[in-house]
Amino acid sequence: MKGWDAELTKEHEQVAAQVSGLETALKADLSAQERQAVLSEAVRKLAPFLESHFHKEERVCFSTLKRITGCQAGGLLLVEEHKKIRGLLKHLRELLQGTAPLEWEGVTLTVDGLIEILEDHEKKEDYLIVEVLRKNLKPTELEKLALAYHQAGEKSSSLEKEGIR
Ligand SMILES: [Fe+2]
Ligand SMILES: [Fe+2]
C-alpha cells in the first residue's frame, strides 16, 4: 500500500523532472529561436502544475503542521519560499517573452536559481511535511489528510477550468 504522502512525493518528482528539463533545454544543441520556444513551452506547463501543488500544500499540509507543532514558523517559511519560486518563474516567463537578442545570461541564472531553491524547498518539505506529520498523526488522520490533499487538487483544477484562478 502506498503511503499517505504518495501524491505529494510524486508531484515533487514531477517538479524536479520538469525543472531539470529546463536545464537540459539550456544546454541542448538548438538555435536561439528553438531554445526560446522549447523553454517557453516548458515554463507554460510548469507554472500551472506548480500552482496547483502549492495550493494543495498551503491549504492542507501547512495548516495541519501548524496545528501539530503549535507554531506558524515552518509553514510560513515554506509559504515565503513558494512566493520566491513564483517570482522566479514569473521573471523567467518575462525574460522568455522578450524579443531577440534574448538575455540568455539572465535566463540561465534564473533557471539555476529555480533549481537550487526547489531542491532545497522539497528537502525541507520532505522533513517538515512528510516526516513530521507521519510521526505525529494517527493512521486514520493520515488517511484523512491524504484525501483532503487529493480533493484540494481537484478543487484547484476545477477552479482553473472555470477561469477563476
Ligand atoms: Fe512547497
Ligand atoms: Fe512541495
Image (cartoon, rainbow, N blue to C red):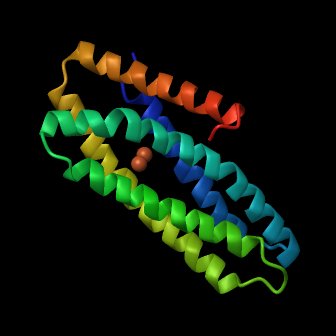
Query: Measured along the vertical axis of the image, is residue 106 above or below residue 92?
Result: below
Query: Measured along the vertical axis of the image, is residue 107 above or below residue 71?
Result: below
Residue nearer the viewer, 156 or 123? 156
Pick the quarter of the image with the C terminus: top right
Whether residue 31 is visible here, answered yes or no, is no
Q: Quadrant of residue 136?
A: top left
The picture places residue 41, in percent across and down from the top left corner, at: 77, 56
Residue at 54% x, 49% y is 15
Number of marks: 0
Whether residue 137 is visible here, answered yes or no, is yes
The picture places residue 36, in percent across and down from the top left corner, at: 80, 70
| Residue 115 placement, left or right of 139 | right
The picture places residue 54, in percent across and down from the top left corner, at: 47, 44
| Residue 129 placement, left or right of 10 | left
The picture places residue 117, in percent across and down from the top left corner, at: 43, 64
Farthest residue to the top: give it: 140
Query: Measured along the vertical axis of the image, is residue 115 above or below residue 135?
Result: below
Farthest residue to the front: give it: 164
Q: Quadrant of residue 139?
A: top left
Query: Measured along the vertical axis of the image, is residue 53 above or below residue 145?
Result: below
| Residue 2 placement, left or right of 103 | left
Pick the quarter of the image with the N terminus: top left
Residue at 25% x, 12% y is 140
